[in-house]
């Protein structure tokens, strides 16, 4: 899979996306989570955000990812990290069990994004927060993700454009490898990158 590629990961480090942990921190600071809040990182890769949410904020954070290779790699570095194989479209947690769901640079890769959003809604407690960053088409007048969130009973609280971080990652990839190999650009039109926070009502 593209995001397992060493060319990309040599540049991104353990966070396989634009912006690294700075966007994770921005989202967390926007959400009034209680101490020990239960958070699930969907598509957690090697678990860098899970480790960060636990060590910096003391949250009860866990992660799932479809890639056995990335999960194994994360556990090799940190065997105690609670990261597991799992799919965004069938979350391994009970209804109304999570205070927050993090989904960083994952939804646009899915063939069934609406199934995943329905799962996020099912797994979140009422009033729980969805924190998401991803690619989007900057040319489009309507943002598909906003419609989907509304239809799934979420209220959008924060939307920020962070396309500069996508450009920065692209530049770093070209300087390191002479190409954009490994950057799986899922947006049509002019690609951009967003961060959003939404609340389950
Ligand atoms: C661009 S990487 C981002 C990884 C991680 N969120 C991060 O920011 O470092 C996309 C991740 O989504 C995972 N992924 C792709 N399809 C998935 C699915 N259906 N369910 C769960 N994870 C998935 C990939 O294995 C990969 O780790």
Image (cartoon, rainbow, N blue to C red):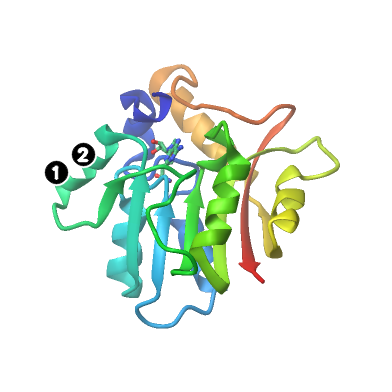
Vertical arrangement, residue 59 with respect to residue 171, above or below: below
Vertical arrangement, residue 167 with respect to residue 81, above or below: above
Classify residue 140 as left or right of residue 21.
Answer: right
Callout 1: helix, strand or loop? Answer: helix
Q: Is the C-beta separation of discs 1 and 2 under 8 Å?
A: yes
For disc 2, the neighbor class at 10 Å (few under 14, some 14 to 19, many from 20) is: some
| Residue 73 - label | 2
Residue that lies at the very extreme toward the top in this rendered image: 178
The residue shown at (35%, 48%) is 64
Q: Which residue is mark 1?
A: 76
Ligand 1 within 8 Å of disc 1? The answer is no
The residue shown at (80%, 35%) is 139
Can you give x and y, in whole percent of width and height, for residue 97 in the image? Answer: 44, 69
Callout 2: helix, strand or loop? Answer: helix
Q: Nearer the viewer, residue 43 or 120?
A: 120
Quadrant holding the N terminus: top left
User: Gap between marks 1 and 2, in whole Å?
Assistant: 5 Å
For disc 1, the neighbor class at 10 Å (few under 14, some 14 to 19, many from 20) is: few
Can you give x and y, in whole percent of width and height, for residue 101 in the image? Answer: 48, 60
| Residue 172 - label | none
Can you give x and y, in whole percent of width and height, for residue 152 in the image? Answer: 68, 56
Q: How many marks?
A: 2
The residue shown at (58%, 60%) is 121
Vertical arrangement, residue 64 with respect to residue 177, above or below: below
The residue shown at (35%, 44%) is 86
Residue that lies at the very extreme toward the bottom in this rendered image: 34
Residue that lies at the very extreme toward the front in this rendered image: 95
Quadrant holding the C terminus: bottom right
């Amino acid at each position: 899979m593209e995001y397992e590629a060493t060319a990309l990961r040599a540049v991104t480090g353990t966070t396989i996306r634009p912006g690294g942990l700075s966007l994770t921190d921005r989202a967390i600071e926007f959400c009034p989570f209680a101490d020990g809040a239960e958070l699930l990182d969907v598509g957690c890769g090697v678990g860098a955000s899970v480790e960060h949410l636990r060590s910096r904020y003391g949250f009860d954070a866990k992660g799932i990812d479809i890639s056995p290779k990335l999960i194994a790699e994360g556990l090799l570095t940190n065997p105690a990290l609670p990261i597991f194989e799992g799919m965004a479209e069938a979350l391994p947690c009970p209804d109304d069990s999570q205070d927050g769901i993090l989904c960083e640079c994952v939804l646009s890769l899915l063939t069934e994004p609406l199934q995943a959003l329905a799962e996020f809604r099912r797994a979140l407690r009422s009033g729980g927060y969805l924190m998401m960053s991803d690619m989007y088409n900057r040319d489009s007048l309507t943002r598909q993700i906003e419609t989907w969130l509304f239809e799934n009973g979420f209220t959008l609280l924060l939307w920020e454009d962070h396309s500069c971080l996508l450009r920065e990652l692209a530049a770093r990839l070209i300087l390191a490898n002479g190409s954009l190999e490994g950057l799986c650009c899922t947006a049509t039109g002019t690609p951009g990158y967003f961060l959003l926070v939404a609340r389950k009502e």
